[in-house]
Amino acid sequence: MTNQKEVLQPLRPGKLGIYVCGPTVYSYVHIGNARSFTSFDTVVRYLRYRGFEVTYVRNYTDVDDKIINAAKEQGEPAQELAARFVREFEADARAMHLLVPDHSPKVTETIPEILALVQKLVANGVAYEAQGDVYFEVGKWPGYAKLSKRNLEDMQASERATTGEQKRAPLDFALWKAAKPGEPSWDSPWGKGRPGWHIECSAMASKFLGETFDLHGGGLDLIFPHHENEIAQSEAGFKKTFCNVWMHGGFLDLDGAKMSKSLGNVVRLRDALTQIDAEALRYFFLSTHYRSPLAFTDKSLADAESRMEYFYETLRKVDARTSNQDFGAGPLHGDPSKWVTDFEACVDDDFNFAGALGILSGLFATMNELMDKPPVKDKPMIGRTLKALRAVVGKISLVLGLFEDEPGAWLLRRRDRQVKARGIDQAKVEALLNDRRAAREKKDFAASDQIRDALKAMGIESMDTPQGTTWKVLG
Ligand code: AMP
Ligand code: ZN
């Protein structure tokens, strides 16, 4: 509200109520939506990690013009289409490792609360009925535009052309819309109709979090009019502050423009996840501050996945060196807890996950140095330190939603994706590796080197490890 960073002071000690505007379920979500949901998912994870008891609410808009239009086009009842895309969203959210919110209310399940709030607004003199519609009268609410800081007169001038017949003033907005034939509708004191878009979030937030709550999130595009209208409805209805802190996420851009269904420049999340690992996509999203724009390119995704490969390879090596090993008690090299302190200091400052990923890089570089160029000779000390650093990775990665996989399994899936994408003949690779093994057994190192070069020409690197020979796709 102040356009500044604010100290998050819980309304009730140790507890936080968080509301995030969820998807309108008329189609599959794109990776722009996924960026927004991943940012707030990570915020919730972090606040829980910090010890807060978080109640996390993310709604489904399952009644809306876009749904009605899509249903008409596809010849499917609107309610069925919406229910289908709720299920599809749930599958996508699972694939993206998003937490399941504590409450995921739908408009169709919140009609009594919506009607009660609209009635309250009419009773409070800030809303009026007109031919079965009900509108919020912006002129009666002096606090309007305090979030977006827009100038009411400028807005009125630009809205004039779109003034609806029923509205008294251009900026008034619909709380309830009279039913049109063939559309979903519910009984109300003003006849059959359905809710306007904004009212649902006011009704749902108060239903699950109370009339005032701690934190509200959504993409930048929602500041006006959606969030402005949520504030007006809730504060004019309940006569209380709506929420303490607002967080708005920057856009994911494709070819220089916001990724959006209306522009048509979208990449569906599920299509992206056939090309890239979900954790690598999370890494890509988190590598830029949540408020800043983020440009999507195929290269940036590929880079994110190679980075994840480096991380997972490091973890595999650390695990091979340390699991089921007892290094005894004793001093460590350096102070592993410093990484946790640095991580927390970074994220405490406006959820700087990008900075946190930088810290993670330092942590991985330290683990690699301990394994490859040990700065001390004391092997048990190195073992103990690696174990302690591995535990720090586990702690941090729970917050970021990364490294939830077993390293070997993750690396194998990455390799399978690369093999497929590049049309590599896996049987031929395995045959060459067998030939190379045979040549080495016969101590025919010239032949072995020749085969290694042939593999390299195919984009394959063979690696001899204590567990045997494995291979990876280069670059
Ligand atoms: P919608 O289903 O269009 O209401 O969008 C769901 C969420 O995704 C909202 O919080 C939007 O602000 C957000 N969103 C939509 N497009 C983008 C984008 N290109 N980048 C980031 N967030 C977006
Ligand atoms: Zn909303």
Image (cartoon, rainbow, N blue to C red):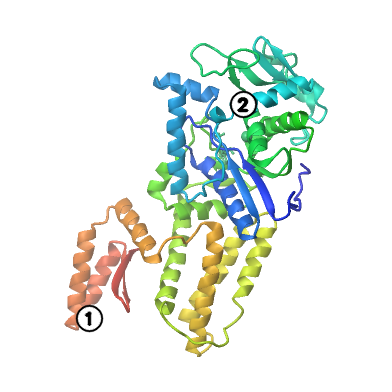
Q: Amino acid at mark 1?
A: Phe
Asked if residue 13 shows in the view, the reply is yes
For ligand 1, give the image quadrant: top right
The residue identified by callout 2 is 112
Nearest to viewer (mark 1 / mark 2): 2
**Residue found at x 64% / y 55%:** 47
Please, what secondary structure does the residue beneath circle 2 have? helix
Which is nearer the eye, 214 or 74? Answer: 214
Q: Position of residue 67 (x, y in %)?
A: 50, 25
Q: Is residue 453 left or right of residue 313?
A: left
**Spot occupied by residue 177 in the image (x, y as percentages of width and height):** 62, 17
Q: What residue type is disc 2 on?
A: Pro
Up-down relation of residue 462 to residue 378 (above or below): above
Secondary structure beneath label 1? helix
Quarter the N terminus occupies: top right
- Left or right: 470 as drawn, with respect to 161: left
- Closest to the observer, 465 or 55: 55
**Quadrant assignment, res 72:** top left
Q: Residue at x 27, y 52 (%)?
A: 423
Q: Are marks 1 and 2 in contact (CB under 8 Å)?
A: no
The reply, left or right, for residue 226 in relation to residue 31 is right
Residue sitting at the far right: 142
**Category of crowding for the residue at label 2, using alpha-carbon neighbours closer than 10 angstroms: few (below 14), some (14–19), many (at least 20):** few
- For label 1, the residue is 445
Q: Quarter-wise, where is residue 135 in the image? A: top right
Q: Position of residue 307 (x, y in %)?
A: 47, 61
Image label count = 2
